[in-house]
Amino acid sequence: MPSINITQKWMWHLWVIENPKETNLTVVGFHKETGTVKQILITGWTIGLGG
Protein backbone atom coordinates (compact mmCIF):
# COMPACT_ATOMS: atom_id res chain seq x y z
CA MET A 1 0.00 0.00 0.00
CA PRO A 2 1.27 3.48 -0.69
CA SER A 3 2.28 5.49 2.37
CA ILE A 4 0.84 8.82 1.26
CA ASN A 5 -1.06 10.84 3.88
CA ILE A 6 -4.28 11.08 1.88
CA THR A 7 -7.61 9.35 2.45
CA GLN A 8 -8.00 6.24 0.35
CA LYS A 9 -10.70 3.61 0.08
CA TRP A 10 -9.83 -0.07 0.19
CA MET A 11 -12.14 -3.03 -0.32
CA TRP A 12 -11.44 -6.04 1.89
CA HIS A 13 -12.75 -9.48 0.98
CA LEU A 14 -13.09 -11.84 3.94
CA TRP A 15 -14.46 -15.35 3.57
CA VAL A 16 -15.83 -17.92 6.04
CA ILE A 17 -16.81 -15.53 8.82
CA GLU A 18 -19.66 -17.03 10.83
CA ASN A 19 -21.22 -13.78 12.18
CA PRO A 20 -19.77 -10.83 10.24
CA LYS A 21 -21.92 -8.22 12.00
CA GLU A 22 -20.61 -9.43 15.38
CA THR A 23 -16.96 -9.54 14.25
CA ASN A 24 -14.33 -6.81 14.53
CA LEU A 25 -11.37 -6.30 12.20
CA THR A 26 -8.11 -4.84 13.50
CA VAL A 27 -5.83 -3.22 10.91
CA VAL A 28 -2.26 -2.22 11.74
CA GLY A 29 0.77 -0.98 9.84
CA PHE A 30 4.05 -2.78 10.55
CA HIS A 31 7.45 -1.20 9.80
CA LYS A 32 9.78 -4.07 8.86
CA GLU A 33 13.02 -2.30 9.75
CA THR A 34 12.07 -0.87 13.15
CA GLY A 35 9.43 -3.41 14.18
CA THR A 36 7.01 -0.66 15.17
CA VAL A 37 3.24 -1.04 14.84
CA LYS A 38 1.11 1.95 13.84
CA GLN A 39 -2.61 2.65 13.81
CA ILE A 40 -3.95 2.74 10.23
CA LEU A 41 -7.68 3.35 10.64
CA ILE A 42 -8.64 6.94 11.41
CA THR A 43 -11.40 5.89 13.85
CA GLY A 44 -9.24 3.64 16.02
CA TRP A 45 -7.47 0.30 15.87
CA THR A 46 -10.57 -1.81 15.24
CA ILE A 47 -13.63 -1.53 13.02
CA GLY A 48 -16.78 -3.61 12.96
CA LEU A 49 -17.63 -5.67 9.90
CA GLY A 50 -20.94 -5.30 8.18
CA GLY A 51 -22.72 -5.08 4.86
Image (tube, helix red, strand yellow):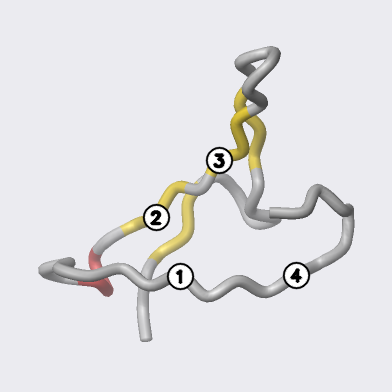
Please give the residue where the numbered disc 2 appears in the rendered image.
25
Q: Hey, which quadrant is residue 8 in on the image?
A: bottom right
Q: What amino acid does circle 1 point to?
A: Trp
Q: What amino acid does circle 3 point to?
A: Val
Please give the residue where the numbered disc 4 appears in the rendered image.
8
Q: Where residue 6 sits: x, y (%)?
A: 87, 62
Q: What amino acid does circle 4 point to?
A: Gln
The residue that appears at 15% across and 68% down in the rendered structure is 16
Disc 3 is placed on an element classified as: strand
Gap between marks 4 and 1 measured at Cα: 13 Å
The residue that appears at 60% across and 71% down in the rendered structure is 10
Disc 2 is placed on an element classified as: strand
Residue 14 vertical position relative to residue 32 in the rendered view, above or below: below
Q: Horizontal placement of 46 versus 10: left or right?
A: left
Q: What amino acid does circle 2 point to?
A: Leu
Gap between marks 1 and 3 measured at Cα: 14 Å
Q: Horizontal placement of 22 versus 35: left or right?
A: left
Which comes before the other along the chain, label 1 or label 3? 1
The residue that appears at 77% across and 54% down in the rendered structure is 2
Disc 1 is placed on an element classified as: loop
Q: Hey, which quadrant is residue 45 in on the image?
A: top right
Quarter of the image for the N terminus: give it.
bottom right
Residue 12 vertical position relative to residue 3 in the rendered view, above or below: below
Disc 4 is placed on an element classified as: loop
The residue that appears at 47% across and 59% down in the rendered structure is 47
Q: Which mark is residue 12?
A: 1
Which comes before the other along the chain, label 2 or label 4? 4
Please give the residue where the numbered disc 3 appears in the rendered image.
28
